[in-house]
Image: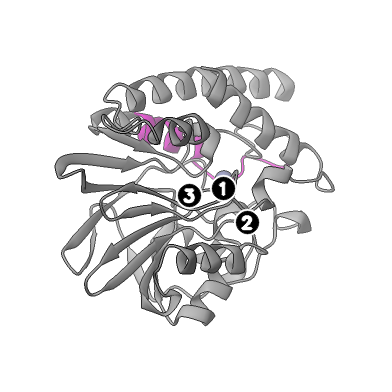
Amino acid sequence: MRALVTGLTASLALAGAATAQTPAAWTTPTAPFQLADNLYYVGTEGLSSFLITTPQGHILIDGAMPTSAKDIEASITSLGFKPSDVKILLNSHAHFDHAGGLAELKRDTGAKLAASAADRGALETGTYPGSEDVKAFDFPPVKVDRVLNDGDQVTLGGATLTAHITPGHSAGCTTWTFPLTILGQKHEAVLYCSTSVAANRLVSKAKGPQYPGIVEDYRKAFAKLKTLKADVFLAPHGEQFGMEAKRAKLASGAPSPFVDRGELTRAIAQSEAAFDTQLAKQQKAAQ
Ligand SMILES: [Zn+2]
């Protein structure tokens, strides 16, 4: 419970004031580590970036902050891989703390970016739709090479990831599912996009909702996420999936602390309750 509440509070604190400092952990480098047989954590202390390696090149998911690209590349290199072998870039959602480094990563690696149709505009303009006036939310724009719709798959060198559009947090918020193995054992991984309310206006008299239909979109996302099965639950913020605590336990060996079949269900239930609270609060404020 605590982890998700903390994540939401951090996001809200950020959203509250455009001038607010982002949490230090978001820009603090951390040692990369192997999470599964071909999956590595290469993000910062607080913001995830995942590397999926294959014999035909690699897939990198999320670019953290605008200043994070070089840290992510250094992590890839320190694991013994080459940034120039990254062929495909993916994104959970088009916010500055997860898409900020993508433009530089794309330039440096030469990889192609595949992203959802509904997040394409935000990525290509580097803005937060509905909050274009908040300059603190801007990030370097990045061109989308392949537009994805719900259920589309991305494949490379034997790895296949499926895009599930779980909208609300951003209009094209994309939850990724993919099989992986840990010590040779097969598992299903879900990289959850996020369903926190964060900076989003669900209801607002003065400015209107963040985008039309946002509340219905969150409902769709919760419904969709409840249909997914996860042995391994991953998320864009380390605190959303207990990354630090699990990493600390990795050293003690099998079974992997990252395998937890109940975690997705618990996370979604908590997030939906937090959403209902936030919605009621915003509705009351709008009266
Ligand atoms: Zn976000």
Q: Sequence-wise, which precedes: disc 3 or disc 2?
A: 2
Spatial CA span between label 3 and label 2: 14 Å
**Quadrant housing residue 88:** bottom left
**Is mark 3 in CB contact (under 8 Å) with mark 2?**
no
Is residue 190 located in the magenta-colored stretch of the structure?
A: no
Relative depth, front residue between 83 and 221: 83
Position in image of residue 274 (x %, y %) = 54, 20
Q: Residue at x 27, y 41 (%)?
A: 189
- The answer, for residue 287, to whether it is visible in the render is yes
Q: Sequence-wise, which precedes: disc 1 or disc 2?
A: 1
**Residue type at numbered disc 2:** Phe
**Quadrant housing residue 103:** bottom right
**Quadrant housing residue 286:** top right
Examine the rendered structure and indicate whether residue 59 appears above or below residue 130.
below
Which of label 3 and label 2 is nearer to you? Answer: 2
- Ligand 1 lies in which image quarter? top right
Q: Residue at x 45, y 33 (%)?
A: 241
Q: Sequence-wise, which precedes: disc 1 or disc 3?
A: 1
Is the CB of the residue bearing disc 2 within 8 angstroms of ligand 1? no
Relative depth, front residue between 221 and 193: 193
The magenta span reads: 206-222
Q: Secondary structure under badge 1? A: loop
Which of label 1 and label 2 is nearer to you? Answer: 1
According to the picture, the residue beneath numbered tag 3 turns out to be 171
Q: Which mark is residue 96?
A: 2
Examine the rendered structure and indicate whether residue 23 appears above or below residue 151.
above
